[in-house]
Image (cartoon, helix red, strand yellow):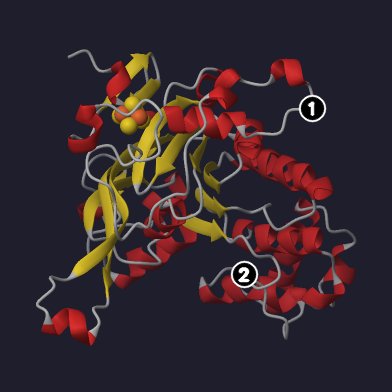
Amino acid sequence: MIQVSEVKLRVENLKKYFPVKRSISEILRGKPPRSVKAVDGISFEVVESDVFCLVGESGCGKTTTGRLIARLIEVSDGRALYKVSKEVKELMPQGIFVYGDYVSLFDKLPSSIDKLLKREIQIIFQDPYGSLNSRMTLGSILEEPLIIHSIGSSKEERQEIIYKALSEVRLNPPEEFVERYPHMISGGQRQRVAVARVMILNPSLVIADEPVSMLDVSIRAEILQLMLDLKSSRNLSYIFITHDLAVANYICDKIAVMYLGKIVETGLASKIINNPYHPYTKALVAAVPEPDPSNRLKMREVPIKSEIPSAAAVPSGCRLHPRCPYSMDVCKTQEPPIIDVEPEHGVACWLYVKR
Ligand code: SF4
């Protein structure tokens, strides 16, 4: 049983709807405004020092969820309670806490608090090529966040911090790397710099959005291991976003599988990977390459049909029903609730609801 005090982040009924632009003819015909329901009422908890994975195909809402938590985009609805670290708590006025050490992330907050939270909750982007400014040296790239957050009282002090950050991500000797530009290093090294740029601010929650998907397979495991090592040495929590269940299996403690803006299955990573219940999760697990055919899950026998529909035209009832081989009448009209099929394992599927 998880104690409330161990929860780093509690997300309740999170929604993000993007309005769809209507054409002139749609306006003239009086067609009502529509929206893309990118994230449609999801709830989850991230336990301190855990790696919580959001898994699903492109367009399922996982990246939007990460950006909402990082407050890069505005929410349409919902709440997120975040437990601030001890160091940052001391810098915050008491009145800001809604409960214990928790602040409400989506409330309008004073700019000084906002800045502290931006330091606490950092995001690593997918693209190590586009996320680093090609005209800046690696030293300047790493110095920029220190200046923004007033860390280090002198150039020399900041340089020390930068050297330490580069060594921590195993870019040695750091004095050589600070002089280089992003185009002078490999993709794996660039992602290490992106990790260093985040860690240099000493965050408490890191959102990693597909951080290894653009890297060669040969160096993915190294970056994932680096992230795990940093988590242990710094007592970090991660929200790890990936489309790849093999990656999730490697790094995650808990998984939430998303489909068209909803969580369809959630629980301990070992339970989701080894014993999936939801037809969609079963199909995802079966799609993971497995060198030993005898280990392959039997779910290859029940493939999910056709392509994922547009998020602007979400099917009624269970969103998977047009693609699901088990679809029943109830699936077409009523959305299934998430029910516990075993301890720490929830599934949203009418197959498991006693009626
Ligand atoms: Fe398939 Fe129905 Fe379960 Fe949805 S609720 S996954 S359509 S069986």
Q: Is residue 136 left or right of residue 91?
A: right
Residue underneath mark 2: 152
Q: Residue at x 72, y 82 (%)?
A: 136
Q: Quadrant of the C terminus?
A: top left
Distance in Å between CA atoms under marks 1 and 2: 50 Å
- Quadrant holding the N terminus: top left
Ligand 1 occupies quarter: top left
Pointer 1: what residue?
A: 291
Above or below — where is 98 with respect to 338?
A: below
Nearest the camera: 57 or 247? Answer: 57
- Give the amino acid type for the residue marked by disc 2 in the picture: Gly
Residue furthest out toward the left: 30
**Mark 1 sits near ligand 1, with its Cβ under 8 Å away:** no
Could you tell me residue 252's position as x and y percent? Answer: 57, 33
Query: Image point 52% across, 17% down: which residue?
Result: 275
Residue 242, given in percent of the width and then of the height, sits at 56, 46
